[in-house]
Amino acid sequence: RSAAAPFRAAAAGSPSAGSPATVSTRLSSEGPTGVLAILGGGGGGTAQLPQQEDAPAAAGSLAGGETPGGGGVRYSLQLSLAGVGVALVDEEPQELVYSSLSAVELSAVATDAEQSAHLSIGHAQVDCCVEASKHPVLLVPVASPTEARADGAAPPPTLQAKVRRRMGWEGMLFLDYLSVGVQPLAIALEQNLAARLFRLAAHLPAAGAASLDGSATGA
């Protein structure tokens, strides 16, 4: 482990008076924490190293006695959507962009020892809905969802994200695994659409304040 990792020192045994001391060390790991054990023996003897504690078991002891992946399931979530779409409309009203996602898979599991989540989006696309637009597609993966690869396999999902967190480490966020993968994307943003989006963003705070004032007056 690197020198920057936190260590907890433990000493066992002590040399007798007038005898040369023999010192042995062992470096082990308990989750994100490095443990440096320093053991001394007297009389020129060889110090006996203790049995190394299994790292997952040690981490589990900090999580209430449960080993990682074990313990009771606190919650489990499984979400599967064939497709979902969201339209962005300004104050005129005029539809500016339409975002669509397909083959959406979301799963999450939490136990007493760990939490994990996985998100996969098969295809994502954002269309420009402004009239007379020269680029009707604002954002789209370079590889078409129906385009097969050279080996005959389907293209990978547009977005994949996985994370696994170990519990039981107070004051520390300990991630066993974190991965995010995004396929190459093509972007085509026109000046007209950009100006409309900036105008909508500038108008939103005033619209939200007016809505809150209206609700307070009606109450």
Image: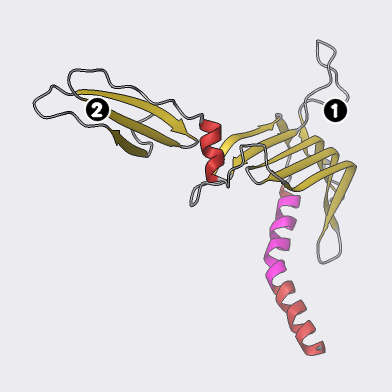
Which of the numbered marks, if any, corresponds to residue 21? none
Find numbered disc 2 in the image and state the secondary structure of the residue it sits on.
strand
Q: Nearer the viewer, residue 54 or 111?
A: 54
Residue 49 position within the rendered picture, expressed as x and y whole percent measured from the top left: 35, 23
Q: Are the two marked residues, 2 and 1, in contact with CB atoms closer than 8 angstroms?
A: no
> Which residue is located at x 70 percent, y 29 percent?
184
The residue at 58%/35% (across/down) is 176
At label 1, counting other C-alpha atoms closer than 10 Å, the crowd grade (few under 14, some 14-19, many 20 or more) is some
How would you classify the magenta stretch by its main secondary structure? helix
Between 198 and 151, the residue placed more toward the observer is 151
Along the line of sight, which residue is nearer the eye, 38 or 98? 38
Q: Quadrant of the N terminus?
A: top left
Magenta stretch holds residue 207 = no
Type of the residue with mark 1: Pro
Left or right of residue 16, residue 213 in this image = right
User: Which numbered disc, 2 or 1, marks the residue closer to the eye?
Assistant: 2
Highlighted range, magenta: 192-205
Q: Amino acid at mark 2?
A: Gly
Residue 101's spot in the image, x, y percent? 84, 41
Residue 40: mark: 2
Q: Position of residue 104 (x, y in %)?
A: 83, 39
- Residue at numbered disc 1: 145
The answer to whether one can see residue 135 in this image is no
**Residue nearer the viewer, 204 or 80:** 80
Check the picture and name the quadrant holding the C terminus.
Answer: bottom right
Q: Is residue 27 left or right of residue 14?
A: right
